[in-house]
Amino acid sequence: MRDNFEVPQLPAEPTAEERAEYVALRLEQFIREGRKDEDGMSFRKWQAMAKSEIAIAIAEAEMAHEDDQLSSKRVLFVVGASMTTIGFWGSAVSLNKVGYLAGALVCGAAGLFMLLVAGGFQFRKWHGRRQAKKRREILKRIESLNRRIKRLEEELDDEAEELEELLAKARRINRGRKAS
């Protein structure tokens, strides 16, 4: 049995299989960390933790899908509008209905706006991955700290037991001296 059980990191854009594996490993971690002296964990407690982890995984997947879908629609709309604008004003310039400078300014502005929106989409994706990485690192530090605290608690419990045994021996010695 593994003593230092760790759940692997979830990738930035996990597949359904990766999410399922992550949830299964988190549940295994709950079982391993929740039991005391081989008694195990109560089924109700495990069930509540399982439901919570599964609900969180499903909610995260749905939110990621909705965010990606909304951003994709926004980028698609802006690209379509920009291309239409560039095409219209390019046609107007080619038919000599509008001056070259005015057409160039409108087409340039539409193209720049299209690039900014597409770049903003990529920046949001990059920023989201960066934030997720930071959160994972923070969670790893918290889990490490929790493990160290548990280890210290166990050491303190062992030390307390040793001190209680020493105190009991000292009391027995004192009783033996008083009796004689």
Image (spheres, grey):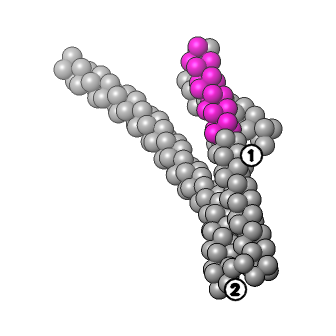
Residue linked to disc 1:
14
The amino acid pointed to by label 2 is Tyr
Membership of 48 in magenta stretch: yes
Residue 57, can we see it?
no
Disc 1 is placed on an element classified as: loop
Asked if the residue under mark 2 is in contact with the one under mark 1, i.e. CB atoms within 8 Å, the reply is no
Residue 133 image position (x, y, % from top left): 60, 56
Answer with mark 1 or mark 2, whichever residue precedes in sequence.
1
Mark 1–mark 2 Cα distance, whole angstroms, equals: 49 Å
Query: Could you tell me which residue is drawn at 54 percent across and 44 percent down?
Result: 143
Q: Can you tell which quarter of the image residue 43 is in? A: top right
Query: Residue 137 vs residue 179: left or right?
Result: right
Image quadrant in which the N terminus is located: top right
State which region is magenta: 44-63
Residue 127, can we see it?
yes
The amino acid pointed to by label 1 is Pro
Query: Could you tell me which residue is drawn at 75 percent across and 82 percent down?
Result: 96
Residue 134 image position (x, y, % from top left): 55, 56
Q: Is residue 121 above or below residue 103?
A: above
